[in-house]
Amino acid sequence: MSVQTIVLLTIFVPIIGSLTIPLAGLISKKARSVWAILIGLATAFFASMLIPFALYGGELVIRKIMILGFDFTLIVDALSVFMSIVSSSIGALIVIYSIGYVSHDENQNEYYLIVLLFIGAMMGLVYSANLIFMYLFWEIAAIACWRLIGFYRKKEFIIKADKAFLVTFFGAVVMLLGFILIYSQTHTFDLTQMRGVAVPGIAVLLILFGMFSKSATVPLHTWLPDAGVAPSTVTALLHAAVLVKIGVYAFARLFNWTFILPSGWQQALPIIVVISSLVAAGAATVENDLKRILAYSTVSQIGYIFLGLSVLNPVGVTGALLFLLMHGLAKAGLFLCAGIVEHNTHKRDIRELGGLIKTMPITAVTFLFCAFSVIGIPPFGGFFSKFMVIMGTIQAGKIWVAALALFVAVLTMVYLFRLFNMVFLGETKLAIPEKTPGMLFVVIVLAVLSLLGGIFIAFPTKLVGVAVSEIFRMGVLR
Amino acid sequence: MTPANLLIPILLPVGLGIISFLIPSKTKLIREIISIIGAGVIFYVAVVLFRIKNLNYIVPWAGTGIDFDLRLYHFSGFILLGLSGFLFLIVLYSSIKMRGHNRIREYYGYVFLTAALANGAVLANNFVLLVFFWEGLLLTLYGLITIGGKESYRTAVKSFIISGFCDFCMILGIGILWYATGTLRMSDISVQPHGLTAVSFFLMMIGAIGKAGGMPFHTWIPDAAIDAPVSVMAFLPASVEKLLGIYLLTRISLDFFKLQVNSAFCITLMIIGSATIVLAVFMALIQKDFKKLLSFHAISQVGYMILGIGTGIPIGIAGGVFHMINHAMYKCGLFLSAGSVEHRTGTTELKKLGGLYREMPVTALCFAVCAAAISGVWPLNGFVSKEMIFHGSKETGYLIFTIAAWVGAIFTFASFLKAGHSTFLGPRTKDIPRVKESESLILLPMIILAGLCILFGVYNKLPLTLFIQPILEGHVPVGEHLDFSNHGLAVANPIAMISILCLFIALAIHFYGWNRGEKRAYLASEPIHNLPVLKMLYNKSEARFFDLYEQGVKVLKGLSYILFVGVDRTIDWIYEKFVTFIGRTFSRALSWAHSGNYANYLAWCIAGLVIIILFIGKLLR
């Protein structure tokens, strides 16, 4: 198969496949579940088929000419391949986990349809090299996200879903204005033709609205903790695989790979994102809701990814991209562990839980593994990525920002241990066993991957290294 | 030997750790036998490597200057030898003491992983690799403390967060050093600290002191003494962490940074060292639990090492490093003897113990030797290394630090008189039934350690020339005298005289207190405990007022609350209330306008039409 075919399959298998879910649902429940898993796995498989191509520094631009400059342009390079693998493989694992998790819920056809459409939109966005198509996939993701957050049709849940949709939609529309502003300067939406262009600060501001709202960065973040009303699988998907990673990826694609940031933003961005990280870490320390704590933790960790990208040097960007992967694995693990706890105990307030390590030992240990990775403790994967983000920040001469980022890491230890201690240790309040072997399998895989990702850091680093050298090849950055 | 053999001290313990995890917990003896043999092999490898001296192993790792770079040279070989020696003794001891523990699989697993990580940290020649192993130790420390019991996880978290904080400081320091020097290779770095690199020095110093358990990063150790198994205390805070922390501190102040005698950096180190000595020994003095008393000494003794290294004078530095290995031996021995007492009597509360020397003579003897060594009694190893530190600190001209060290010596001996007196001497209490001496595998490590304390004291030339002096080669001006063994056991000088006088003062203090406490030895420290100002300070300290962790967590919680309410909730309020209010007001205004009255709608239409016509007219013009 040619690279072009593989890319098109990666995008359209989940998108078109998602539409066939209701048909499979007509046959039987089981057929639909198997079909959904197959589509998820196929997407991940096609994405990883591109590794050899990307690893040797291959770069392919696929262009289908359309009217008014709205060309359907795709870019296949190490950056897009890396991101698509991260999203599709974590997404596939979450689909597998879903089988056990949503098995008693209604509207399962809709669930799988939207989840796969979501993954497909993500794939489309990742490979898009045209701002308009990027926006298009961006909004498909927003609609999918809105439907999934309100999956349990309670009124207050739907309000939260509306909130998420409105905030991200507002951000995206503002971003679109930014795109148009750039168009007025360059007369193209094609990213490959805009490499090395210096964009005006106002356009950066408008685009950042979109990215920050999607990636839940302070002050556009509060919809994300509220989105915890969704099924845990959905929150895992939003936090680890698809939704919040959109903004970060778009940042890397636009402001690292394509455009040159104005120097004012180069100074301001690290400070903004580290403050976002700090505020969210503080909120996570105060909250008592299992999933809200993890959600704030995501906001806080996304700050690290943005930090690594915004310091604009190879070490920082490498760290940020690695953290995309490691955080994805670990955070998916944490949410899915939380899902097991919630699924079995029907409780989310950590003050009502305790001592679960006795009845849920595997969940507890995998939770701890993932927590260590998020904190950044070696030999877990989070260590290298966070370490490199901080090193990159120091190399950019921003020592105070790095110190603040490390302070946030201390807070991360505090709130994750608080969470772990209150849920799994101490006095036993509810003794409920972990049933669901399928769900356990997925969390074990995620925890083990978090560990192996650290021990065999050289492997992901290779691909990321290619992506970073491509970013810096054009001399776009220092 | 090929350089790849440097991986053995890392991979072999990892393998043993995994095997221990896999062996079912019900099996008898197999785990113990494999562990003892494995630890023996690791020790043998360390001996071989120590004799080889120089090896270097590099493979690329995570790019951008981050290589998997191991380097064996004299100093790292020496620490490796120490680490594997203690591993062997602890494994030997644990084979009896930990037998039948319900988490035995994890225990051995963590012990071997600790050994692997510690060996890796010592051999690392790239800062990232160092941090990788160094910070990885947090995990095994956490795991080992949780084995202690149901509530020990609180202490485990405390140790994790304190050590994590110190490690993060070190990471920042390493980052700055990388930024300043452009390399991560440890053997390539040697800078004069000023400006940014001075900041880096302080941050890395926090990392090293935090690992060694110096003040103010020590507060988890006394808690762990109660919560963690005693063999864990003997293994981690007493030996492995001291070796690592002081190893790094020595590397920092000798290699990475060139410290001048009496520079601000040296003075800072000496202040931290002497404060640690004095404050911790005062806490140790009043403890009424054997293990807790030992744990405060584990902190206090670090002060001597930091003080010695901080002098920047060869004899002081050599004394500090020598004290490190001496301390590891006698403190490990002391913890093991406390464990032996606990093993038989089931308690370490001094009040309940007494007169055990008849029933447990070997334990009592080993305790006596190690206690004499830590107190600096002639001719044991503690005497020699302390003398070297006294000489070094006096040479700096700041007599205050020497005096602090002497004060420490007085109360060290006083508290060990109290501990030994109330455990092994005095009347036998009725709280404990008759006991037997512990099994020989428990006694053997203690005997070895006590023997080494005597050997390293009486024949101090051996360790000094074999281990310590080569470390300083290349760090003193050419031609300067590098043989410290002539100081050794000399008593005919004023410093040694004062040190010996300190011991007599301690004896007097103890017997005064013992008399005042109606001949109950565990009350011997009460006269000092009840001194006017001290009593208030002691009370505050017992209430954890001076515990940086407790206060720090309070501050973090307060800060978090401010961030949560002040920023996060305020922003959310704007979304939830303000934005929705505007939206609602707007739509209410519109719905008010849409009253269903045709005339109204017609008026709207006409108005719109007029606007469009005006607009088009403007365009046409």
Image (tube, rainbow, N blue to C red):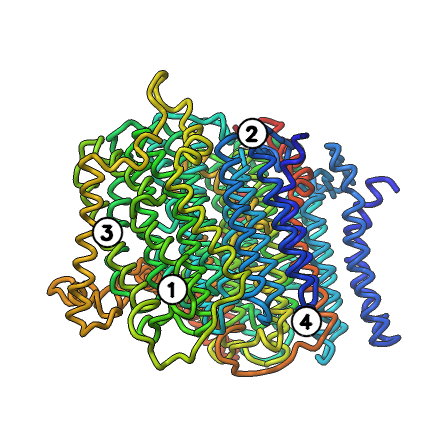
Residue A347: where, in percent of width, then height? Answer: 55, 79
Question: Which residue sits at x=46%, y=44%?
Answer: B244
Chain identifier of the residue bearing label 1 in the image: B
Residue B492: where, in percent of width, then height? Answer: 21, 35
Disc on the earlier residue, 4 or 2: 4
Residue B227 in the figure: left or right of residue A464: left
Please state which amino acid type lies under the numbered disc 4.
Answer: Lys
Residue behind mark 2: B53
**2 and 3 marks on the same chain:** yes
Q: Disc number at residue B278?
A: 3
Residue A404 in the figure: left or right of residue B500: right
Residue A442 in the figure: left or right of residue A225: right
Q: Residues within 10 Å of mark 4 (few under 14, many from 20)?
A: few
| Image height of B54 relative to B217, above or below | above
**Which residue is at the front of the view, A244 or B492?**
B492
Question: Which residue sits at x=70%, y=67%?
Answer: B24
Q: Could you tell me if residue A163 is visible in this image?
A: yes
User: Residue lying furthest left in this view?
Assistant: B532
**1 and 2 marks on the same chain:** yes
| Image height of B606 relative to A374, above or below | below
Q: CA distance from mark 1 to mark 4?
A: 30 Å
Chain identifier of the residue bearing label 2 in the image: B
Disc on the earlier residue, 1 or 4: 4
Mark 1 falls on what kind of element?
helix
Disc on the earlier residue, 2 or 3: 2
Chain identifier of the residue bearing label 3 in the image: B
Residue behind mark 4: B26
Question: Which residue sits at x=62%, y=71%?
Answer: A361
**Which residue is at the front of the view, B27 or B570?**
B27
Please state which amino acid type lies under the numbered disc 2.
Answer: Lys
Q: CA distance from mark 4 to mark 3?
A: 47 Å
Question: Which residue sits at x=30%, y=42%?
Answer: B386
